[in-house]
Image (spheres, rainbow, N blue to C red):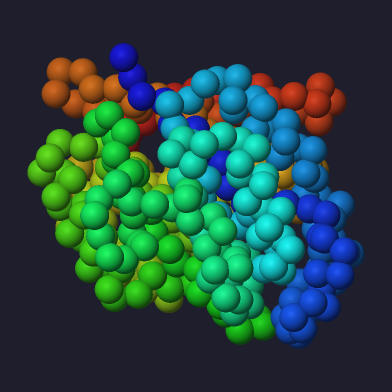
Amino acid sequence: MGFSLAHFSDVHLGPLPEGSAFANFSPKRVMGAMSWAFNRRQIHLPEIAEALISDLKNAKPDHIAFTGDLVNIAALSEFRRGVEWLKSIGPSDWLSYVPGNHDAYVAVPWAKSLGLFEGYMTSDLRQEEQFPFVRMRRNVALIGINGAIPQSMTRAGGSVGQTQRQRLREKLKSLRERGFYRTVMIHHPPAPGLAHSWRSLSDAAELKVILEQEGAELVIHGHNHTRTLNWLESSHGAVPIIGVPSASMIEGGSHETASWNNYEIDRAKGKWQTLVSIRQWQGQEKSFKTISEFELAKTS
Ligand SMILES: [Fe+2]
Ligand SMILES: [Fe+2]
C-alpha cells in the first residue's frame, strides 16, 4: 500500500490581529501591515485556507507537509493564533512544518514565535540541533530545513547556512543508504534562478550542489505562490522540485489560485513511483477539485 503525503504552503493567515502592526514596534512590520490592509487582505482569505484543510482531511493523507509562511508580519499575536490553527488541523506527529520568510519577517524571540510551532518541527533522530529535522514515516523520510532569517526592508530572501547544509548532506546520504524515499521540505526554492534575486536564498547555489551530489526523491517548497515543477540532475537520479501556490489565494488574485498537492508514493519493481494530484480551489462552487493528475517522471 502506498504512502500519501499532502502538501500545502503560504497560508498567510488573516486577518491581522488588532494592534499587531504597532506592538513591539518595527518599521518593516508597519510596512507589512500596510501591504496587508491595502492588498493582501483582499486576496488571502482565511476561509479558503479552512476549505483547503477540510478538503485535505477528507483525503485522509498519511502525513501533511506545510512549507511555511503561516503568518504575515511576525507579530507575536499571529504566532499565538497560528499554533491554535495548526492544532485544529491535527496532531503534531501528523503534520510537519518548516518556517517561511514571513515567519521571520522581523527578529522576534524564538520562544514567543516559531518556538510555539516546535512540536511540528521535531526530529525522530536524536540530535542537538533543531534543523534539519528528520521524520520517518514507514519508508518515507521528511527532512525539514529552516531558511528563514530576518531580512532587510526590501528583501524576502533567506539563508540555510553552512552548518545546516553540512547536516543536510549527511542526512541525505545516510537516508539514501538506508533505502528511504527522501522528501526535502524547504520554504524557498533550493536552486538559483527559481526565484527573483531579492526573494531567493543566499546559498541556493550551494544547496543545489548538495542535491546534485546526494540526490533526493522529492523536494517540496512554497514562497513563489505558483505551481511549478523543475528537475535537477543528480548522481542518484533526477530530483523533482515542486512548488505550490498559496493555500489562501482567491481566484483571479495576484498569484495562482489556492491549491494543494497530494503525493501517492509507492515502490514497485525496485523503483519509487509518485502519483501527483493537484486539488485547486473553485471560487464558484466554493470547493476544491482535482485539476491534474500525473506520474512523476522526467520526460526530457
Ligand atoms: Fe508566502
Ligand atoms: Fe515566502
- Give the vertical position of 234 relative to 22 (above or below): above
For residue 268, which quarter of the picture? top left
Query: Residue shown at 29%/22% (left/top)?
Result: 266
Residue 16 pos. (x, y %)? 81, 60
> Which is more toward the observer, 259 or 237?
259
Image side of residue 161 versus residue 70, left or right: left
- Measuring 60% from the left and 68% from the top, which residue is drawn there? 112
Q: Is residue 244 visible?
A: no
Q: State which quarter of the image contains the C terminus.
A: top left
Q: Residue at x 21, y 60 (%)?
A: 169
Residue found at the far top of this picture = 1
The image quadrant of residue 24 is bottom right
Q: Is residue 23 left or right of residue 160?
A: right
Q: In the picture shown, does residue 247 fall above or below 16?
A: above
Residue 151 pos. (x, y %): 57, 79
At 31% from the left and 14% from the top, the residue drawn is 1
